[in-house]
Image (spheres, grey):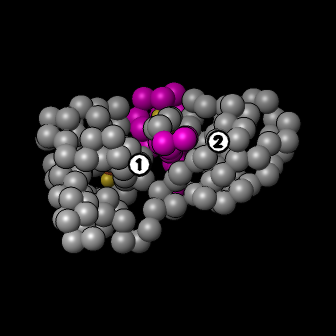
Amino acid sequence: MNMVFQINGRDVGIEVSDSELLLDTLRHIGFSSVREGCGVGACGSCTVLVDGKSVSSCLVLTSRCNGSSILTSEGLADDDPVVSQFIKNGAAQCGYCIPGFVMMVSELLSENPIPTEQEIYNHLEGNICRCGSYPEIVQAAMDASKAKQTSKLTC
Ligand code: FES
Ligand code: FES
């Protein structure tokens, strides 16, 4: 089928088969931050936001996203507070899982700008980091929340 959606703010028109997964579509187009880990919805490494909500792209048919707006971590600015704080806190070891965590933290802070540590852990419970960077990832989320609050006050 022919479909049109937005990826990171740009209109994209493509032809896809009815069975194509969003993970494969995004990677074929060139969004390599979208990574396959488990392939069955259990690790979070393929997470993207569709119309602002996190999805495991390994479980979503591309054809179901016709007309949707998709955000991958390539769509976040270099000075995005979440990206910046992941870097500052050294949250990435191998880095494979990090784009998925970044998208989950971005979603959380848009819904709950000042989450508690427990709320961060709860929101990220579906994402797995095989390197065990959880303390740094949670600290990055807390610092990104603070950075966003500070930038609001100075605007
Ligand atoms: S690859 Fe999609 S959740 Fe693991
Ligand atoms: S940083 Fe290596 S899997 Fe998370």
Toward the viewer: 135 or 85? 85
In the shown orientation, is residue 54 left or right of residue 131? Answer: right
Numbered disc 1: secondary structure: helix
Q: Residue at x 16, y 48 (%)?
A: 135
Q: Amino acid at mark 2?
A: Ser
- Residue on which the image places disc 1: 103
Assign the N terminus to one quadrant of the image: top right
The percent position of residue 138, horizontal first and vertical second, equals: 20, 48
Q: Is residue 133 visible?
A: no
Q: Residue at x 51, y 28 (%)?
A: 40
Classify mark 1: residues with Cα within 10 Å, few (<14), some (14-19) or many (20+): many
Instruction: Report how many numbered discs are placed on residues in the image.
Output: 2
Assign the C terminus to one quadrant of the image: bottom left
Q: Amino acid at mark 1?
A: Met
Foreground mark, 1 or 2, reads: 2
The percent position of residue 46, horizontal first and vertical second, equals: 50, 43
The main secondary structure of the magenta stretch is loop
Mark 1 residue CB less than 8 A from any atom of ligand 1: no
In the shown orientation, is residue 42 left or right of residue 153? Answer: right
- Residue on which the image places disc 2: 68
Query: As displayed, is residue 113 above or below residue 11?
Result: above
- The question of residue 138 being in magenta is answered with no
Q: Earlier in the sequence, mark 1 or mark 2?
A: 2
Q: Residue at x 64, y 41 (%)?
A: 68
The magenta segment is 33-52
In the shown orientation, is residue 147 left or right of residue 13? Answer: left
